[in-house]
Image (cartoon, grey):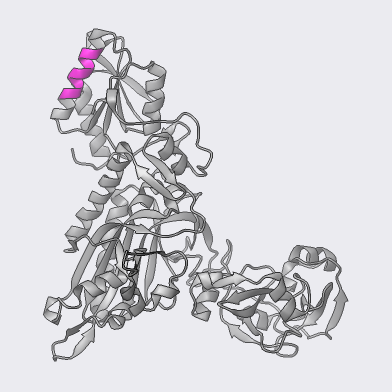
Amino acid sequence: MRMFNMYMPTLREVPAEAEIPSHQLLLRAGMMRKLISGIYSYLPLGYRVIRKIENIVREEMDKTGSQELLMSAIQPKELWEATGRWENFGPEMFKLKDRNTREFCLGPTHDEYFANLIKDEIKSYKQLPLNLYQIQTKYIDEKRPRFGVVKSREFIVKDAYSFDIDERGMTNSYMQMWKAYEKIFTRLKLKYRIAEDNFDAMEGNNSHEFIAMSDTGEDLIAYCNNCDYAATDKKTKVVYNIQQQNVEEKEMEKVHTPNAKTIEDLEEFFKMGKNNFGKALIYTAGEEPIVVMIPGDRELNETKLCNYLGIPEHELEMADEYTVETITNAKKGFAGPIGLKEDVRLLIDSRITKMKNLIVGGNQTDYHIKNANYDRDFDGEVVEDLLMIKEGDICPKCGEHLMIDRGIEVGSMLQLGIKYSSSLNATFLDENGKEKPFLMGSYNVGISRSMAAIVEQYHDDNGIIWPLVVAPYQVIITIINTKKEEQKELGEKIYKKLVNEGLEVLLDDRKERAGVKFNDRDLIGIPIRITVGKKANENIVEYSLRKESDKVEISTDEIMDRIREEFKKEDFKL
């Protein structure tokens, strides 16, 4: 491709809305453009990267025997009503009506669609197992789109669904996809971890996420360096040691604490650490007010709370001040477990039951209670674990300390079981002629997210550093001065030779200053660089790699050997 008339609108300045490196660089490198918040167009360079990621995914999926199809992004309301998700999915679903007022959605996922597709076609156990996949655009009406294509309203996903006879078959399909995903993300050169995930408790059984490690990622992953344990913050079981079992319970006492509304205020007031307090948080779950009590030195894991309550996360909200005052008779900041309105539901993290002589809110403005003890002074629904993990917590598998890192979810796998097949009456006849629902598995790869994750892991201050396997072009030839006939002729000669060798090549033949060309070259991140300059009449060029600072002058006869060597290092076939 000649760059003279190429559509590559690079930017010198960082766009104001771009918060993380991938968002900044994909915009600056002219690889994508924002239409509105959370919706992007992929320009020629960026779309070449997308297609390369898609092709890697296709190759590995096809090797498993999975078959590709393409479904509509528009799905009828009736499918989602059958599984109860039309209302339960929440405000993140884009809904629309046709001219006849029939209701549809733009698919955030295709679980119902796939189950419905096969239910009248696959009738016998002899036709199973079956695995189908598509690469499709999905839609989520994100409340706060951010980080470019990492958290957007429209995104490209490979979603696959397996259909099996029994649990054993579902597990086999799951592990087959696991191995395929390991190959996909390894080929994409991503540094990743596989973590247990805790998705909606209504959804199914086993679940894992593939997390591309990134300091800017929104996902948290806890892992142990001593064993193979790894889990998302939504899933990780918090092991929280309590050393107070044999402490004598003291007499309860009300204390005047003017303006001490936060745990930090109370630490200062009582001159005691956070682990001496019980923190009461007030929410509305649907329309029901609830109070949740956890140790004062920990944070609540709202996903664990929603799973316990059996509600989607969008139904959980912090209570407003009116609700707080109604159920506590106090201003916000003084809620506690003693003296709540009788019909208010109180959920207690199990660690609270083992803590002695807690300081808790007094349910009276400017007052707290000292020496409150579970069972003697208050009780409620005890929940095993409602806490957010933090670094240094104990590994639930081996007892060593956990580490916490950030990352971007690029893949997910979950066993759906019969949730969707039973709701949609998608059944087959087993070997005894008995009708049974399919056991389903769901497997996603974020195509556009993977592109962003690669940039997060491969960039420097000057721009993107694409691995060869996904680079929009493999080689860029820069002619320093197109007015010099010998430079132009040599550049053209090398370009034609490399194209004939099957390489993807950019020829920068623009009438721009050398500095502009070099800056653009760094920004768009083409892996192999050839610079044609003053020694063109000697058939000498400068050869360099985007990922390294070294530059070397070589004869044009050496170019292909150098390129082959680099392809071999990258384990990439020419």
Residue shown at the point (17%, 18%) measured from the top left: 493
Residue 336 visible to the viewer = no
User: Which span is picked out in magenta?
Assistant: 488-496
Q: Is residue 372 above or below residue 178?
A: below
Looking at the figure, which quarter contains the N terminus?
A: top left
Viewed as shown, does residue 210 lie left or right of 539? Answer: right
Residue 27 image point, x, y percent: 42, 38
Residue 507 image point, x, y percent: 26, 24
- The residue lying toward the viewer, choosing from 376 and 89, is 89
Residue 464 image point, x, y percent: 40, 36
- The residue lying toward the viewer, choosing from 4 and 256, is 4
Residue 329 visible to the viewer = yes
Viewed as shown, does residue 24 lie left or right of 243? Answer: left
Tell me where residue 63 sits by quadrant.
bottom left
Tell me where residue 495 sits by quadrant.
top left
Looking at the figure, which quarter contains the C terminus?
A: top left
Residue 266 image point, x, y percent: 79, 67
Residue shown at the point (39%, 16%) measured from the top left: 513
Residue shown at the point (66%, 83%) measured from the top left: 353
Count the marks: how many?
0
Tell me where residue 381 sits by quadrant.
bottom right
Viewed as shown, does residue 270 lie left or right of 414? Answer: right
Residue shown at the point (75%, 84%) measured from the top left: 338
- The residue lying toward the viewer, choosing from 421 and 538, is 421
Q: Is residue 492 magenta?
A: yes
Q: Is residue 486 magenta?
A: no
Name of the residue lying farthest toward the left: 126
Main SS of the magenta segment? helix
